[in-house]
Amino acid sequence: MLLGRYGAAQSAIPAPAPMNYLAVQLKDGEHWRYTPPAGHTVGWAAVSAGRLDAGDSAGGPIGTGELAVFEESGAAIDFVARGDTSFVLGSAVKHPHELVMGYYSVHTSKATLDQGEAEIRRIGARLRQEGRLA
């Protein structure tokens, strides 16, 4: 358990929001079912080794180096390892606001996105001027 709580496991670090983040290792052919806590309707998995079948909600098998975002649902996710497989799995309560995504950051409005990215550009210019950024 990297972050959150699942079954009897609880992370040493308090989760900043209702979310779980797990590191999972499965042997070739091993099955594992993740049942998200109540309210967790957002899920994702990233495979660092092996290949992972996670049903139709992942859009097909997930290979090494790939990230899959699952269809929004509170349903259990069944995983099957194809080869010895390591992956991280996250689930969370959906953010209550629409999100606006930029190149460097994510915000809850276009105005705050513009402000945040302007600040990133300002800091970058200052660091370049000071010779601390190429």
Image (tube, rainbow, N blue to C red):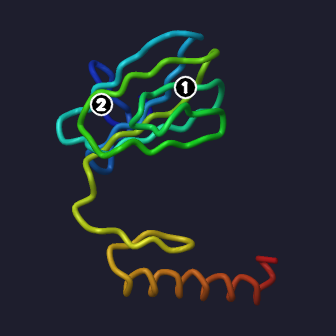
Q: Quadrant of residue 40?
A: top left
- Residue 64 against residue 28 in the figure, above or below: below
Q: Residue furthest left?
A: 38
Mark 2 vs 1: CB contact within 8 A: no
Q: What residue is rendered at 29% in x and 68% in y?
A: 98
Dot label at residue 101: none
Residue 131 in picture, x, y percent from top left: 81, 82
- Compared across the picture, whether 130 is left or right of 100 comes to right
**CA separation in Å, label 2 and label 1:** 23 Å
Query: Residue flagged by tag 2: what amino acid is it?
Result: Arg
**Looking at the figure, which quarter contains the N terminus?**
top left
Please tell me which of labels 2 and 1 falls first in the chain.
2
Mark 2 element type: strand
Dot label at residue 5: 2
Residue 81 in picture, x, y percent from top left: 54, 18
Residue 128 in picture, x, y percent from top left: 76, 84
Residue 9 in picture, x, y percent from top left: 33, 22
Name the one closer to the observer, 17 or 55: 55
Name the one closer to the observer, 75 or 104: 75
Mark 2 nearby-residue class (10 Å; few <14, some 14–19, many ≥20): some
Q: What residue is rendered at 26% in x and 41% in y?
A: 73
**Looking at the figure, which quarter contains the C terminus?**
bottom right
Query: Residue flagged by tag 1: what amino acid is it?
Result: Leu
- Residue 107 against residue 121 in the figure, above or below: above
- Residue 19 against residue 50 in the figure, above or below: below
Q: What residue is rendered at 41% in x and 39% in y?
A: 90
Label 2 vs label 1, nearer the camera: 1
- Label 1 belongs to which residue? 52
- Residue 97 against residue 76 in the figure, above or below: below
- Compared across the picture, whether 94 is left or right of 119 comes to left
Mark 1 element type: strand
Q: What residue is rendered at 60% in x and 17% in y?
A: 82
